[in-house]
Structure formats: C-alpha cells, structure tokens
Image (cartoon, grey):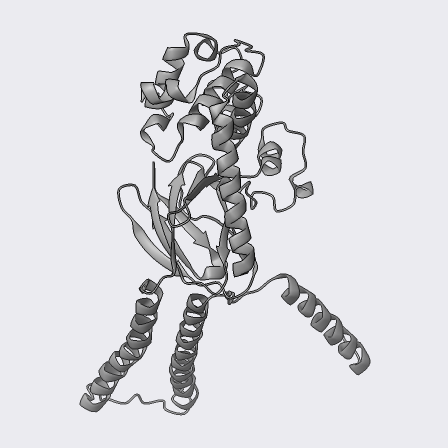
C-alpha cells in the first residue's frame, strides 16, 4: 500500500497516540514503590540492564563488523591463524571484571535489604490456608486478615455475581494490615500449615512463610496509601484467594487506630463475660465467613467430594463434644485449630455455636469459651 507524506504523518500520529494510551495502562519495567528497598532494587535492576545493553552492543558490533568486512566476496581465502594468547586473556578477564562489577553492587543491595537492625516496631506475620494472621507484640493487638466477603461471595460456584462488579476482586481483605509511615518496621514471618509467601510488589521483595521457621524482612513506607499483594507461593487449592492489603497511615492516624483496636478488644472481652446464644452467633457468623466459608461455602453447602456440607451434617447436629474434638484436633484435610495459640477460645466457641444453629441446623445449644479451654 502506497501512502503519501500526509497519510504517513497521520498514521504515525495515531500509532503514537495508541502507544501513549497503552503505556498509561501497562508498564513493562518494574515499579518503584514507596520504600527505600524498592528503590535499591530498582537502581540495581537498571544498572544490570545497562551493563547487559553494553555487552550486547559490543558483541553484536563485533559480529556485524566481521560479517560485513570479512565476507567471502572481500576475503575469498580464509586466514590460517587460530590461537591468539592476547585475545584469549582479554575475553577471560573482561567477563570476570563484568561479574565483579555486578557482584559488588548486588551484594551491597542484598545486605541493605536484609538489614533489619534499628527497627522501631515489630509485626509478626503468620500464613494460614488461606488467610494471614497479624500480631503487634508491642501493642497487644492481633487479628486475622482474610479475603473480603464481596470477593468471597462472587468467587463461589454458581454465585451469579459478575466479578467485574466487585471492587478489587480477589485483592481486598476484611482487615488490612495497618502500619505507620516513616517508621522502620521489622516483619517476623512464619507459616502455620504449608509454605506461603508474603508479597507486596510495591515494597520490592517477597518472603517465604515456612512452618517451623521465622524469617525477617523490613519496610519503611514513606507515603500514605493502600498497597496490595497476594501470596506468591503455590500453597494449595484456592491459592489465589489469599490477598494482602497494607494500609499505610500517618503516625497520628496509626495511634488512633491502635486505640480503636484496643477499645474493640475490651468490648469483645466484656461481651465474652456475658456469653449467650446471641453473642456467640454474631461473633461466630463473622468468624465463619472469614475462616470457614472458603471451604464449606457461605451457606454451609460444602463442595461435593472435597469439603463436606455443614447444613444437616451429622457432625454439626450430633454430639457437641465430638464436634469440639474434631474442630480442635482436625480431621482429614481439616487443620487442628485447637493447637494454634493464635486462635482464641471465644472464636472457636462462637463458630461451633454458629454452625450448630445456622444453615437450618437449629440445635439451640451454646458452646462457651470455658468448654473450649477444658477441651484444649
């Protein structure tokens, strides 16, 4: 197709516009996040790229020079020499120098990324199938963070909900991790069942959460905002439903949040003192939707062949002590929740009470935190 000059300019303008729009939606390079570690990683990444570009220019330059200047039409008789000591020394020394040039800054970056000294606060992160547990030892605050209810309902089989209508589908949680900005925070990361990986791309790193081991990492977020990530390990069925949300706030907002959490905790402890069916059902509904619905489904119908239904289940409607034992000790693929000190007696009592009185079970009994403590 032959185009005149004006047509070619028009096509070039359209391509430039399309390219600008595409660049706004997509990014080829790694992002630079709001942390020092992300900048260190980005700087070394760009340094390594330009080293590779330099190598490519030199190597391809020599290749094309040789192809053009030593082609058969110009040199029909090939040269007879082969070994050249000087050349062999040069192409041995140069790669060594390149490796040293890459090793020194990469080692420096790794040391800086792994240096957790001088942290102003600690947060313990524990990975579960399929949620995270966050603990603030200095503040006395701990909670689970699970897939938000809107995403969880939309992902259910035959839910009839278009995931595109759910904000941040599969990337939102019920309780985000809240951190203050401009504060060096050390993360203590471990796993409770299988290997997970805590990964927020904006922070520039990810860390495995391995049962029986505690690994460390640190972050100092410089800009308030919401930063999202996911488990980056293939940790089992429903692996994709384990998002991470970090909410970075100012130090004043963080102090207010801590005070609010302590007030909620005091209220929860006060409610536990007046334990009854209503209190247990309200707390149990929240705990079930956060921790049990991903397997047994929000309506207790289960997944045939994989996770048993709780609606009308002989376990949920039978002997209560037998059900408590199963929840505490586990059965088959079901974890032994009673062996995990992060799970409170109140939550276990509430969720058992809820299951025995929801989904049409209507048993009417109330399991108390004391029942769980005795069984433990």
Question: Which quadrant is home to the N terminus?
Answer: bottom right
Residue 191: x and y in percent read 34, 42
Question: Which quadrant is home to the C terminus?
Answer: top left
Q: Is residue 58 above or below residue 10?
A: below
Residue at image point 31% right, 64% down: 117
Q: Nearer the viewer, residue 281 or 189?
A: 281
So how many labels did they put on this image?
0
Q: Is residue 151 above or below residue 224?
A: above
Toward which corner of the image does residue 151 lie, by quadrant? Answer: top right
Q: Nearer the viewer, residue 161 or 214?
A: 214
Residue 80 showing in the rendered view: yes
Residue 333: x and y in percent read 37, 25
In this rendering, position of residue 23 left or right of residue 91? right
Residue at image point 34% right, 69% down: 112
Residue 1 showing in the rendered view: no
Q: Nearer the viewer, residue 1 or 300?
A: 300
Residue 307: x and y in percent read 46, 22
Residue 208: x and y in percent read 35, 50
Q: Is residue 98 above or below residue 179?
A: below
In this rendering, position of residue 292 left or right of residue 166? left
Q: Nearer the viewer, residue 104 or 78?
A: 104
Toward which corner of the image does residue 3 lie, by quadrant? Answer: bottom right
Residue at image point 30% right, 68% down: 111
């Amino acid at each position: 197709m032959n185009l005149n000059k004006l047509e070619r300019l028009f096509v070039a303008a359209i391509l430039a516009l399309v390219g600008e729009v595409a660049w706004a939606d997509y990014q080829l390079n790694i992002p630079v996040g709001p942390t020092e570690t992300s900048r260190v990683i980005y700087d070394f990444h760009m340094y390594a790229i330009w080293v590779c570009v330099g190598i490519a220019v030199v190597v391809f330059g020599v290749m094309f020079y040789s192809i053009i200047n030593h082609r058969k039409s110009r040199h029909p008789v090939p040269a007879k020499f082969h070994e050249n000591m000087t050349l062999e020394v040069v192409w041995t020394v140069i790669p060594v120098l390149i490796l040293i040039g890459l090793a020194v800054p990469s080692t420096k970056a790794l040391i800086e990324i792994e240096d957790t000294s001088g942290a102003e606060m600690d947060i313990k992160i524990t990975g579960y199938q399929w949620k995270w547990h966050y603990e603030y030892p200095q503040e006395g605050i701990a909670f689970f963070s699970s897939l938000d209810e809107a995403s969880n309902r939309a992902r259910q089989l035959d839910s009839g909900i278009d995931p595109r209508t759910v904000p941040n589908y599969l990337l939102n949680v019920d309780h985000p991790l809240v951190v203050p900005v401009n504060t060096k925070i050390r993360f203590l990361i471990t796993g409770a069942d299988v290997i997970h990986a805590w990964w927020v791309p904006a922070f520039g790193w990810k860390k495995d959460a391995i049962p029986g081991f505690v690994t460390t990492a640190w972050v100092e977020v410089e800009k308030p905002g919401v930063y999202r990530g996911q488990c980056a390990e293939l940790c089992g069925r429903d692996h994709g439903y384990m998002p991470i949300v970090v909410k970075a706030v100012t130090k004043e907002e963080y102090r207010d949040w801590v005070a609010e959490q302590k007030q909620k905790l005091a209220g929860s402890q006060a409610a536990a003192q007046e334990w009854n069916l209503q209190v247990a059902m309200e707390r149990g509904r929240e705990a079930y939707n956060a921790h049990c619905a991903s397997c047994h489904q929000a309506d207790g119908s289960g997944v045939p062949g994989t996770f048993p239904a709780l609606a009308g289940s002989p376990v949920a409607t039978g002997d209560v002590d037998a059900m408590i034992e199963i929840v505490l000790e586990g059965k088959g693929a079901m974890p032994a929740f009673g062996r995990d000190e992060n799970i409170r007696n109140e939550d276990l009592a509430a969720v058992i009470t809820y299951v025995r009185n929801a989904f049409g079970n209507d048993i009417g009994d109330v399991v108390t935190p004391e029942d769980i403590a005795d069984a433990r």
